[in-house]
Amino acid sequence: MQFFSNDEEYLKGIDHYFDSFSNSTKKKFEKSATYFTDLKSPKRLKTFLPRAKVIAVLLEPAERAYSWYQHQVAHNDPAAISNSFYDILTSQPSDGDRWRLKMHCLQPGEYIDHLKRWFEYFGDGNVIILDGNLLKTDPIKVMNKLQIDLGLQLFYKDYSDIIEFKETKGYFCLKGKTEGTLGVCLGRGKGRDYPEMDQASKQFLADYYHDFNQERLQISVRRRPQMYPVPVRFIVLELLGSSKDPGSLYVASTKDLETFLLSTGKTLPSWLEKK
């Protein structure tokens, strides 16, 4: 809907916003990717919806950057189709459209800077961070837990009854309403396959996001160690390298993380030790 991040829409007023929803008595939600990085959205949303729960779905930042580049390639962005991903990453401010695309690839993945704004207005308990990688590979587990985190027990649905993996699409789709009927999948523009990222780009992004990832993990462990498990791929990729990618492995505490790292011959970094 992009109501809170779009000045033109926002100036139409909150009644205009609520008119976009049905009159159903069920819980209401909306999804707008522009809110997360927008400077005005946290304050605006808090003003009109002070009890709202904010859900941030975060991919590993390097993967998010490459995905955005490939998204622009698919939409025939001249800068994307004329330059390699590494050329975009190493562009300079004087490079015009290449620099513009670089900023759109990199800045949204500076998660900690954006999260701090949302924490400031909504506090830890009302900002729920989901691992976007796990949401893709095991959405049933993620969505079942999310309902509990949101306090939606009265509306609870077991997602194993709602979605299933489709081999032909390569991702999860809605099941048919009755046995033997076709379900609903996203269109052909979703779930695209594209070449693996080149090594030079991987190294550039690992260096670029290093400090952002460390600070994000400190907040994840220290400020909410029990509420939201740490997506350990962020730290393991940093300590062990991409060849040891743990995928969607989760831990619930720093002790669990320490146990996992010891199994790989590593120790818990001092900046993650529990105070």
Image (cartoon, grey):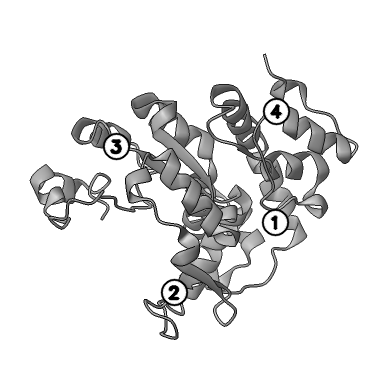
Q: Mark 2 points at which residue?
A: 175
Label 3 element class: loop
The image position of residue 23, as x and y in percent, is 12, 55
Q: Quadrant of the C terminus?
A: top right
Crowding at dot 1, Cα within 10 Å, few <14 / some 14-19 / many 20+, comes out as some
Checking the image for residue 201, the label placed there is 1
Question: Identity of the amino acid at label 3?
Answer: Ala
Q: Quadrant of the N terminus?
A: bottom left
| Badge 2: residue crowd in 10 Å (few <14, some 14–19, many ≥20) | many
Q: Where is residue 251 in the image (x, y as percent from the top left)?
A: 67, 38
Q: What separation in Å lies between label 4 and label 3 (alpha carbons)? A: 29 Å
Give the camera-side residue of 239 and 175: 175
The mark lying in front, picked from 2 and 3, is: 2
- Ranked by sequence position, the earlier of labels 4 and 1 is 1
Q: Which secondary structure, mark 4? A: helix
Mark 4 lies on residue: 254
Instruction: Name the spot of residue 18 as percent of width and height, x first.
Output: 14, 49
- Spatial CA distance of label 4 from label 1 is 30 Å
Can residue 188 be seen by looking at this rendering? Answer: yes
Q: Find numbered disc 1 in the image and state the secondary structure of the residue it sits on.
A: helix
Amino acid type, callout 4: Thr
Cβ atoms at labels 4 and 3 below 8 Å apart: no
221 left or right of 57 in image = right
- Between disc 2 and disc 1, whose residue precedes? 2
Mark 4 neighbour density, 10 Å: few (under 14) some (14–19) many (20 or more):
some
